Amino acid sequence: MRKIFLGSITFAIVLFAFAIEAKPVNSSFLGKRAIHGYDTVAYFKQGKPVKGKKEFAHRWRGANWYFSSKAHLSLFRSNPTRYAPQYGGFCAYAVSKGYTADIDPVAWNIHQGKLYLNYDRSVQSKWARNKAANIKKASGNWPRLKK
């Protein structure tokens, strides 16, 4: 009876931990690195993907976000939703099709002030052919997929 009770408590704690997570973030299994450890602010400020550094790390939404500089870390901390990629950093094209997929940090685009990442450059070109429709579909699918 005690084992069942302890098992139930453990299960409830795990469910609670998942329930309080605001949104899932595409992160590596080891180290929970968001977007493969790339600096999400660099896409906006430098116009290119830049690898982040461990000394400029910040935990947000269950993942570790890495930045290339203290300035980028500060910008992110002050307004993370401004710099975080859409759809938790999953492939925007995949989300538009109703599923999630990993990304390649070099397959990216900023559209109307928002960062979108894709599986690879080939998928990115498919996504870009009809950005507006794909964003609309992805935004409709995301609430179901992020659970």
Image (tube, rainbow, N blue to C red):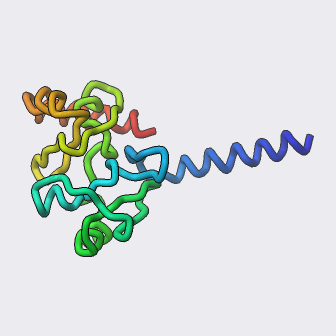
User: Residue 97: horizontal and vertical position, in percent?
Assistant: 27, 25
User: Residue 138: horizontal and vertical position, in percent?
Assistant: 25, 34
Q: Is residue 130 above or below residue 73?
A: above
- Relative to residue 91, is residue 114 drawn left or right? left
- Relative to residue 126, is residue 104 drawn left or right? right
Q: At x 28% / y 54%, what residue is drawn?
A: 38
- Relative to residue 71, is residue 100 drawn left or right? right
Q: At x 55% / y 47%, what residue is drawn?
A: 18
Give residue 5's quadrant in the image: top right
- Relative to residue 4, is residue 111 drawn left or right? left
Residue at the extreme left: 129
User: Residue 55: horizontal and vertical position, in percent?
Assistant: 37, 70
Residue at the extreme right: 1
Q: Is residue 15 above or below residue 84?
A: above
Query: Image quadrant for the N terminus?
Result: top right
User: Residue 126: horizontal and vertical position, in percent?
Assistant: 13, 26
